[in-house]
Amino acid sequence: MNAPTDPKLLERSAALQGLGDSRLRKEDARFIQGKGNYVDDIKLPGMLHMDIVRSPLAHARIKKIDKTEALKVPGVVAVLTAEDLKPLKLHWMPTLAGDVAAVLADGKVHFQMQEVAVVIAEDRYAAADGVEAVQVEYEELPVVIDPFEALKPDAPVLREDLAGKTEGAHGKRDHHNHIFTWEAGDKAAADAAFASAPVTVKERIFYPRVHPCPLETCGCVASFDPVRGELTTYLTSQAPHVVRTVVSLLSGIPESKVRIVSPDIGGGFGNKVGVYPGYVCAIVASIVLGRPVKWIEDRTENISTTAFARDYHMDGELAATPDGKILGLRVDVIADHGAFDACADPTKYPAGLFHICSGSYDIPAAWCRVKGVYTNKAPGGVAYRCSFRVTEAVYIIERMVDILADKLGMDKAEIRAKNFIRKEQFPYKSAFGFEYDSGDYHTALKKVLDAVDYKGLRAEQAAKRADPNCPTLMGIGLVTFTEVVGAGPSKMCDILGVGMFDSCEIRIHPTGSAIARMGTITQGQGHQTTYAQIIATELGIPSEVIQVEEGDTSTAPYGLGTYGSRSTPVAGAAIALAARKIHAKARKIAAHLLEVGEDDLDWEIDRFKVKGDDSRFKTMKDIAWASYNSPPPGLEPGLEAVHYYDPPNFTYPFGIYLCVVDIDRGTGETKVRRFYALDDCGTRINPMIIEGQIHGGLTEGFAVAMGQQMPFDAQGNLLGNTLMDYFLPTAVETPKWETDHTVTPSPHHPIGAKGVAESPHVGSIPTFTAAVVDAFAHLGVKHMTMPHTAYRVWQQLKASGVAL
Amino acid sequence: MEVKLEKRYPLDVDAARAWQVLRDVKATAGCMPGAEITEQVDDTHYKGTVKVKVGPANAAFGGDIEVKALDEATRTLQLLGKGSERGGSTASMDLTATVEPGETPTTSVLVGTAAVVVNGKFAQFGGRMMVQVSDMLLAQFADNFRAAAAALPAPEGVPAGAEAAPAPPPAREINALAILWGLIKNWLAGLFGKRPAA
């Protein structure tokens, strides 16, 4: 579709508010008026409330649970423990990673605040009082917090339920606290590269445990209708269809009688992908009691128990020539998965897509290994605003390239340009086997370096370093990252055996408006706005009259949901292809109405017109009406289509980020002077929404790099599970963001779009670290562990002898 | 969260009377703000409670105390206390306390070493203040202990010490807001270069 130049055509095109239009978000009208409809807004007649008894200890045997006192609390209806779930075989549940997780602790607690019992009561207050009245006797067991300690031969056995099980979901287990070992790449080739390389660097890079911490916590309202035998559950889920399948498998209720509804979702970021004990218990309680049951997490429960992210201890190595050409990469990871392996990854990939860790670089030999380990911490390991483990992968390669540059005394931009995959190499097959679809890294890098006057910044830095009285240290962080998103091709990616396709159903109404139903679910991404734009451009129907519905499994076609930047790459493609099916039928109808052959028609923005005669045309609105009353003979009436899209490949968005920081030598306070983010997400659907996504992702990245942490003490207490401790930046702390873009469409995607929401998170975190470390680079500092709080940076200032 | 404490409190009471209080677990527990022995199970086992009040919220730790050793010769008491609270916290204390003779016959020193482990909400919310709070609680304990010892009749031949002030009734619950205020006062005092009151 070539862009029109005729003003009349431009006007018609603009009226559609299609691809490339910064139309305002349709969702905001209700959100800014407080008219959203979140799970906690749902109130059903006769609804009961559930609260959870949680373990104060990180590792202990349960000697006794006494619910007598709790049942006496006025308003308490029932108390459930693992013993009550046992007859239903629901005291344990399968995880997405092939492990099992306790729904309610079965004889033993494995992490602090693990679910031990639930109390169901007439109101939320009685439920909380009931929780306090449940008496649990524990016998303390030794606690293992450090994954390296967990792997020692004499380490305490954490998972007694796995005793004697030497085979896990991903191969052999060689230790009682070992979950899996997964490898990618060619070890022999990588070892050979290292054996002969003139220069090598090695560093342990720790990516600390963080939590996605969406503004809305997790929760559900389960409502079982005992007469009809139907279960409806309103649930904060990024993947409602998958939840329906899991609920049906666990409960034995036919999938046709299970309805999962994800209403408005207040942020997910990976936290709302999994199935949590609270959901299962609320559903069981509703089935047993025949009344609706609501469970809503509080903030402390959210941070402490539902899906954390990261916690990777990575040993990175690069081999290179003396002039900085990278010859080989090795990465060896110890991954702390907590008490149960509940990572949300495509089934075959226990470490997600971590093997994208060769980054934007043409590295001939590469190998990585990830070893998953049990500890006495909450389970999770989800993709927090990133495709599966891509954040960790980008972090390790970008840190290692900086370390190599410093060792060789090379400029950090120059070493990147030297190793980039060149434009003409695409599609590029990486040493790990990924096929990068498209990219133009050199052009993007030059654009950023010119925009910020990189040479000028380096000169300023050199001058400041030469001045012993300069009160600040200046650091420049540069990151050139490539993501792999849009999981994914079903030959590689599935969840519980269901291929990771996505779906769209479009129905055009007689008067020319339309409804699109999707297998994804928006959590702030603006799907109701952007999906309509794709249809508008494909079918010539104004965005304004296209309704987008998602999240209700009884109306939407089956889809795998929204996470890992997969909505645009996968569902966006399904929309375009469903629309094209309609477009093909519309052409037949138009040909019939205009009494010409299909080949005699041209498509122009919103109409089919007879070639060479602008006066003879039928708009999509005309065609819609005709499709319901005078379809061509032999063609069925109506105008609708369904498409299930199984992507042929992932998409590979990329970005070039640069950050300048000034560190106060007296206080260790790091001031972000400038942050310049260039993103290339292929075709841009709504530039305003993209910019909003990038601002949000950069802000979350800033939070992770500069303040978020989940410290555990030796007893396994999580010392940072309230928003008093856990850093969520507000407008006060957030730096000013400068955004830019290039456009390199994906060749295999129907509209060339690649996905964008996660790039700013993935890319910005190593950029902040790079900037802070770069401030100390001339003092021989190679790496500093996040978060870069003032106190930690001040400690480095002291250690380097430059504190004032 | 584990905190190790080592404290020495000089007392203006002779060692014999101080030991008389210390060896009586009930009396010793009574000196702890908010603590109370509710039941003696046998010679060495007791049940007790500690009440804490934070604004409108009350927390009551209930638990067991075991006297592991009581040595008259060295005037040493060793006990282990373990308890839990309904709101989701547990605590334990392994304590060794000794009364040592003072520099004069009318004085003594109460020496205590303890390992305190707190888990759950108390560790999460209050962890960073545990050392300071423990310092304040123990200072109150030492005051109460001194008063209890001084209230006992002076042994023959030993002149009565500074026992003029009768023992104040021990506080029946720990008031966290009062502790917080005490902490702020100490912090301010430290800030302006004065010696902390405790």
Image: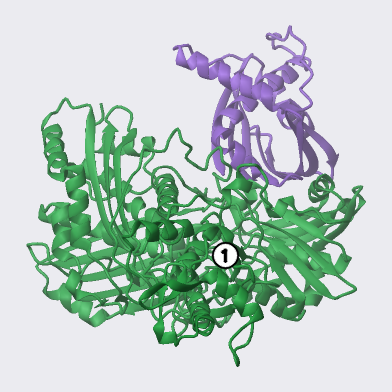
Chain colours: A green, B purple
Percent x, y of residue A681: 35, 62
Image mark 1: chain: A
Residue found at the far top of this picture: B164
In the rendered structure, the answer to whether residue A408 lies left or right of residue A634 reads: left
Name the residue: 88% across, 66% down: A290
Residue found at the far left of this picture: A323
User: Which of the 4 image quarters holds residue A483?
Assistant: bottom left
When the figure is inspected, residue A295 is found, relative to residue A568, above or below; the finding is: above
Foreground: A606 or A442? Answer: A606
In the rendered structure, the answer to whether residue A615 lies left or right of residue B13 reads: left
Name the residue: 30% across, 74% down: A437
Q: Which image quadrant: the C terminus of chain B?
A: top right
Disc 1: CA contacts within 10 A as few (<14), some (14-19) or many (>=20):
many
Residue position marked by numbered label 1 in the rendering: A339
In the rendered structure, the answer to whether residue A455 lies left or right of residue A784 reads: left
When the figure is inspected, residue A479 is found, relative to residue B192, above or below; the finding is: below
Amino acid type at circle 1 is Ala
Q: Which image quadrant: the N terminus of chain B?
A: top right
Dot 1: element: loop
Number of labels in the image equals 1
Q: Is residue A153 visible?
A: no
Q: Is residue A183 visible?
A: yes
Percent x, y of residue A304: 59, 52
Percent x, y of residue A487: 45, 73
Name the residue: 51% across, 14% down: B189
